[in-house]
Image (cartoon, rainbow, N blue to C red):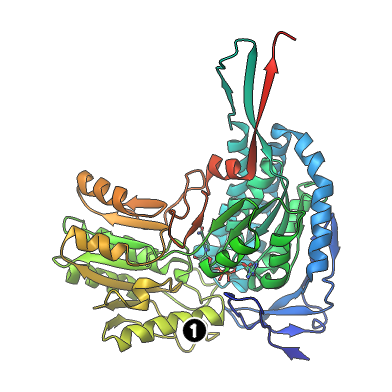
Amino acid sequence: MSFQFHSSLPGLHLRGVPIVDAPATGSFVGTNYIGGQWLPGSSGKFLQIDSPSTGERVGYLALSTRADVGKAVAAAEAARESLRRMGVFARAALCMKVADAIDARTEELARLLTLEQGKPFHREAKGEIGAASLGWRNAAEQMKWLEGASFPLMDPNKRAVSFYQPKGVLAVITPWNFPAALPNLYYLGPAIASGNTVVWVPAPTTSLIAVKLMECFIEAGLPEGAINLVLGEGAEVGDEAVVHPGTQAVCFTGSSATGNVIAARGAGKPLMLELGGNGPTIVLADADVDMAAAQAGAGCFANAGQICTATERLLVHESIHDRFVEGLVKVAGQVKLGDAFAPDTTMGPINNAATVDKVLAHLDDARARGANIVAGGGRAEGLATNLYVQPSVVTGLGVDSLLNKEESFGPIAPVLAFRTDEEALALAASSRYGLSAAVFTASVKNAFTFAEALKVGIVNINEMSCYWEPHIPAGGAAGTASGLGRTGGRHTLQEMCDLKTVTFDVTR
Ligand code: NAD
């Protein structure tokens, strides 16, 4: 028997993943990993995972319940004190071993990533596995040099020092767009380096890669209970990880809608929320137009647009608009869809049907408003699944179009023309998101004027909006729908730790 999977909490995305009573014989079945043991989900049912890139059955994963999360929290709690006592340098050495274990299985992990998430094997999946191991190396290095403080005091007989201590058990909930890189870079490496333990709930459509990563952690000697993997529906197991009294903080990356649910459900706990984006890229009249079009195109079509900091909209000065659009259409024409394992395939499908539907609805909205579809504009036909979307360029958009106001998360380059700097800034601010932006200009003055005025967490000058390195801070700007806190380098570690102050009397 198989039936569709429905969520009962508000603000959730339905992914239409089928639930089955029993996996087909001989298939890959991913299960929970709790307290050093592989355990089935207590619902007794399984999610069936079919490849968005090839259509083949990739495997099944255990569908867990709140009870499984309870076990995972207990295991994480039991491991907490020993991990803290290991000390920073021993934990950093462990992180390096995890990175080596991931690197040693790059081909196998990348293959699964291509099948399960959809991104092309050569051009994207292998690089993502490299980013996953980098997450552990970066966390190990950063943690070793994370300084606390000592303070001059009014009382000459006293001394005071402050240092970082792990918060405890972290609920870590991650999305499907970078299911290998993102959990490791943002949360798992930093959590272990800083001495926290974890209950990890990955996104259901990309949980088999989490199982394989868990195998790497075990090979590297991660202590039992340090990371506990619970597979299943976010609205049930993710929610339980958020509300369980045994988790001390919540680390979530995903949509703004789910982020709002989590902020309410996790009220009172420290929250790290990395949410959606709708990054504007502003191309000023003095920009190098060809370079800007090439960069912007890459920012729109990388990972088929499924990047929180993707180039989601292009605000272009009217004097260079036509030349810029010409360049963008050229980039769209160079994108190659097709065999996910062919070396020259540059773009894969969208991971799931719900997101494809949203992307197509945004294109339909643009058409209905009289915009011009100058490249692509719909589903790519004749490929292995119906989840491929054409790289698309849309012009003549108004401020109220969904492509301007909302996050599309697909391979679309929406272009809006502006006349003055004020108009460009007003357009940039016309979306509720505030994660990333890019500005193309030849002038340092323009670069700083725009960078300082834009209400986002990161601005890249003469570089695509999704450029980021894991040791620099990024995140949502206050008052926007893009989240709370900062990810990157010591900022992640500081968010995962409590600053403890100790005072001494040196005369007693
Ligand atoms: P989503 O919000 O639908 O799901 C994210 C995760 O939350 C999944 O693991 C899901 O199972 C879980 N979840 C769902 N409902 C839950 C609930 N009620 N309680 C707890 N957990 C729940 O997001 P998605 O579609 O998987 O991911 C795409 C979104 O993630 C986009 O909006 C994208 O911009 C955002 N994102 C942000 C960043 C960033 O750094 N800011 C990075 C990557 C992705």
Q: Is residue 270 left or right of residue 325?
A: right
Question: Image height check: is 360 above or below 70?
Answer: below
* Quadrant of the frame with the C terminus: top right
Total number of numbered discs in the rendering: 1
Question: Image height check: is 4 above or below 42?
Answer: below
Taking the spot 51% from the left edge, 63% from the top edge, the residue there is 124
Q: Nearer the viewer, residue 210 or 83?
A: 83
Q: Nearer the viewer, residue 313 or 333?
A: 313
Regarding residue 334, the answer to whether it shows in the image is: no
Q: Amino acid at mark 1?
A: Asp
Question: Image height check: is 504 above or below 400?
Answer: above
Q: Residue furthest top?
A: 507
* Quadrant of the frame with the N terminus: bottom right
Taking the spot 56% from the left edge, 15% from the top edge, the residue there is 154
Q: Is residue 503 left or right of residue 393?
A: right
* Location of residue 379 by image quarter: bottom left
Q: Position of residue 75 (x, y in %)?
A: 83, 53
Q: Residue furthest bottom?
A: 1
Q: Residue furthest front?
A: 155
Q: Is residue 209 left or right of residue 430?
A: right
Q: Nearer the viewer, residue 293 or 423?
A: 423
Residue with the mark numbered 1:
357
Q: Is residue 394 left or right of residue 192?
A: left
Within the displayed image, which quadrant is ligand 1 positioned in? Answer: bottom right
Q: Position of residue 203 (x, y in %)?
A: 64, 68
Q: Position of residue 165 (x, y in %)?
A: 68, 36
* Location of residue 92 by image quarter: top right
